[in-house]
Image (cartoon, rainbow, N blue to C red):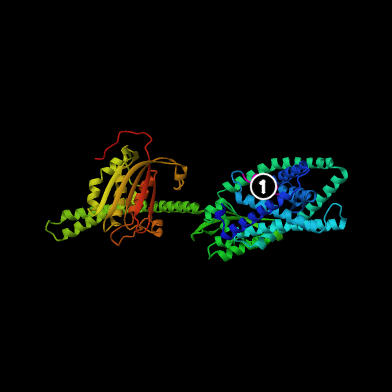
Amino acid sequence: MLRDLPRRGRWYIIAVIALGAATLGLLLPRADFTPLLPLVFLVFLSSLTSAFKVQFPIASGSNMSVSYVVDIASLILRGPHATMIVGAASAWTQSTFNQPKGRPNPLYRTLFNMSILVLAVQASVQVYQRLGGSMTATAGTLTVAIVAMAATYFFVNTIPIAIAIALTTNQNAWYIWKTDFASSAPSYLLGAGAAAVIILVGESSGYSLTLLLAIPVLYLTWRMYRAGVESEARQGAILEAANDAIITMDQQLNIREFNPAAERMFGYKRLDILGRNVALLLPPDDRPQKVSALNQYLNNARGPLAGRQLELHGLRADGTDFPVELTVARLGSDNRAVLTGFVRDITERHALEEQLRQSQKLEAIGRLAGGVAHDFNNILMSIMGAADLLMMQLAPNDSARDEATEIKQSVDRGAGLTRQLLAFSRRQATRPRLFALGDVVGGMDTMLRRLIGPEIDFEIASTPQAVQVVADSGQIEQVVMNLVINSRDAMPEGGRLMVRVDEVQLDETAALAFVEGQPGRYARLSVADTGTGMDEQTRARLFEPFFTTKEQGKGTGLGLSIVYGIVKQNRGYITVTSERGRGTTFLIYLPVAATQAPAVVPV
């Protein structure tokens, strides 16, 4: 929309549209429309070739527009006032029909293009006539007049457009004109010459021959339209649908193209970023090195970017950085080469890799812990047996009996630690059975309330329909107990604790959040508190064995590791969301039992 443009660009466009409308309104009544049929034919031919951008190649990288040849021929034959209709119609059809499907030009852009051509027509014909241009003039006079007319048409047609682009995209107008328009000057001169030759041929050989010459142009228009529709649709669909950011940079590494995926990835609007240096999208620490690599590849196709993907960090509009994978392509000749970068956000991939590493690390530690626990348990049993024999030999009032009792208590504590290690390593014997998860959790209500105390507002909620799973109910109770105790410790001054059981359906997208996640129906157990929460560093190590944030003597660091092991043992998944001062929520997903059966209420 026009109101979305920068203020200077908006008023400039409005001024050009007003000037073009005033010129058309004042001078059109002076136009000579007779004979009408040739004029209608010129309007039709110019509009058709302009709408489908029919061009002839004239040199390496340069083309001559057929619609421009028609416009110049009309200028010479019909004068400036009638040709304003030809130019306005040509601009309208090009702005209306030559656009990607579903992305029509806004009205202000169509009116601006029409105004530019109206002004270019008037200015160029005035110069042509002032210099004595006519088909009856001498060859030298006609040549000078045609060259001057073509130059005027070129400058009036390109400079205002370059200024409009610069004002709406915060770029340099001179640089835009020099880069995008200056190289097309020969096509304007050749087009004007071609128009003069066609007119001379028509006057000497009859206009029926000229009409016959127009037939190949019309046929070429049809063939190019058929070939171009598929090509443009394919290219447009690729740019629009691409999940990767596609960014084109000029020789100064200023951004010249920014596709929708790039807008979503970096948080900049296309019009706000065009013309700005690509260094804006790089973190300050990496900027010099990466800009140097881009320049090196642009200049000689060598360096770190040559033939390989490069991992680096990008910088969003909000100042956050994120990992990306960059591949670049160098297009064009050495003096006009541009770079197109294909940028992929690999944040999710890094997260999945980190989850996989964490899972592998826990698996290795679990195997070690299981082996140590078995050996340690055998030692404890020997100590327990010796303590029992010692107790049998001591008199009831013997002072050493207290020491023997302390030995047995210490052995019991050691045995409890061994059980935790075995649970963590998944080597503890389990008794899976079919039960309703909500019933097992609900049966712990009284015990949990006594455990957490009256300072915490506690609630257990579950869906009316029983959600059944196959697992060891004792292990599930241990999971709930560990999570509730952690939540209690995170709320020393009281708060709210909610345990909820429900059923969810995970689609493929949701399942991708887990490393080996599978879509399907899951029983979801959530434990949410309003406690102190955790920072990102703590969350990253949360399930590591022996990691704890509690004071020394108040935690072994195995509680959440055991929870993780139990969940994985039952083919489930666990996630945690937490922020400092905003509490913590654990979500556990367990596969719903394939065969439903009456719920087994825990004893």
- The magenta segment is 87-100
Residue 548 image-quadrant placement:
bottom left
Residue drawn at point x = 53 percent, y = 65 percent = 284
Q: Residue 452, percent across and down?
A: 25, 53
Asked if residue 513 shows in the view, the reply is yes
The C terminus lies in quadrant? top left
Residue 88, magenta (yes or no): yes
Pick whichever, 462 or 404, lies toward us.
Answer: 462
Q: Residue at x 43, y 51 (%)?
A: 359
In the image, 367 versus 481, the foreground residue is 481
* 399 relative to 426 in the view: left or right: left
507 is higher (above) or lower (below) than 312: above
Residue found at the very far left of the displayed protein: 397
Residue 591 sits in which quadrant? top left
- Which image quadrant for residue 361? bottom left
Residue in the foreground of this view, choosing between 27 and 255: 27
Which residue in the protein does label 1 denote? Answer: 92
Q: Position of residue 320 (x, y in %)?
A: 48, 60
The chief SS type of the magenta part is helix
**Residue 142, magenta (yes or no):** no
34 sits left or right of 365 in the view: right
**x%, y% of residue 219?**
76, 40
Residue 379 at least partly seen: no
Q: Residues within 10 Å of mark 1 (few under 14, many from 20)?
A: many
Element type at mark 1: helix
Residue 210 screen position, x and y as percent:
82, 43
Q: Amino acid at mark 1?
A: Trp
